[in-house]
Amino acid sequence: MGTPSELVERLYSLQVEYDNDEFLLVTPIPDYEQRLYSYQLITEAVHASCHSK
């Protein structure tokens, strides 16, 4: 939950805190299309953040 920038900030914070290279994200949304859309939004937010640096 949150805005795309909040999500990216939180993921970065967790990456620094735990010194990890990857995440396993699970969105517990019963509807397949909505779950797929949530992953697309996450992907777009992370890609936008990577390309803006």
Image: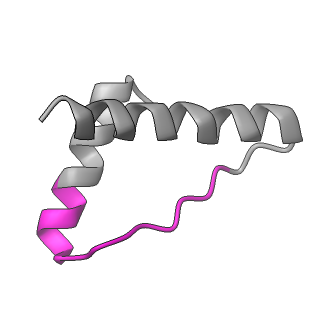
**Left or right side of 40 for 43:** left
Q: Is residue 48 visible?
A: yes
- Taking the spot 46% from the left edge, 32% from the top edge, the residue there is 44
Image quarter for residue 15? Answer: bottom left
**Left or right side of 2 for 13:** left
Q: Position of residue 52 (x, y in %)?
A: 18, 29
Q: How many marks?
A: 0
**Left or right side of 39 for 35:** right
Q: Position of residue 12 (x, y in %)?
A: 20, 52
Q: Which residues are magenta?
A: 13-27
Q: How is the image coloured?
A: one colour
Please tell me whether the stretch drawn in magenta is mainly helix, strand or loop. Answer: loop
- Taking the spot 29% from the left edge, 52% from the top edge, the residue there is 11
- Taking the spot 84% from the left edge, 33% from the top edge, the residue there is 33
As drawn, the residue found furthest toward the front would be 51
Image quarter for residue 20? Answer: bottom left
